[in-house]
Image: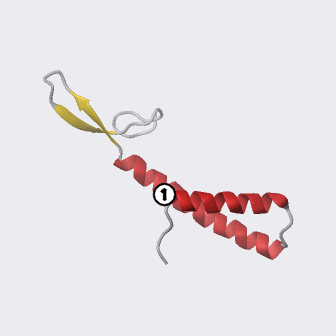
Amino acid sequence: MAKPTFEKAMQQLEGIVQELETGDLPLERAIKKFEEGIKLSKFCSEALDETEKRIQILLQDQEGKVTEKPFITENESEDGTPE
């Protein structure tokens, strides 16, 4: 089976959340849905982490030279460690 896309995994996760929120599932089915949701959540989290690592910001220095610099989140310093 091929890996789902991020969007498909999020859609499936949203469906699971809706099912669990109704409270109409038998316990065993709810547990299975919860386990499936955890796996999808982990997949989505890893996909987002990987995407964040791949994002590059192009910067132009004073001489007009374009360089790449890793994406820095609001909570990270330039060396990539949390502030």
Image position of 76 (left or right of 36): left
Render colour scheme: secondary structure
Quadrant in the picture for residue 9: bottom right
Tally of numbered discs: 1
- The residue carrying mark 1 is 46
Point out residue 46 in the picture as x, y percentages from the top left corner. Answer: 48, 57
Point out residue 71 in the picture as x, y percentages from the top left corner. Answer: 36, 39
Image position of 11 (left or right of 4): right
- Is residue 15 placed above or below 1 in the rendered structure? above
Point out residue 53 in the picture as x, y percentages from the top left corner. Answer: 37, 48
Point out residue 64 in the picture as x, y percentages from the top left corner. Answer: 15, 25
Disc 1 residue type (three-letter): Glu
- Is residue 63 placed above or below 15 in the rendered structure? above
Image position of 66 (left or right of 39): left
Instruction: Name the outermost residue toward the top.
Output: 62
Secondary structure at badge 1 equals helix
Instruction: Name the outermost residue toward the bottom.
Output: 1
Q: Nearer the viewer, residue 2 or 54?
A: 2
Q: Nearer the viewer, residue 35 or 23?
A: 23
Residue at (80, 57) in percent of width and height:
21
Residue at (86, 66) in percent of width and height:
24
Quadrant in the picture for residue 13: bottom right
Residue at (49, 62) in percent of width and height:
5
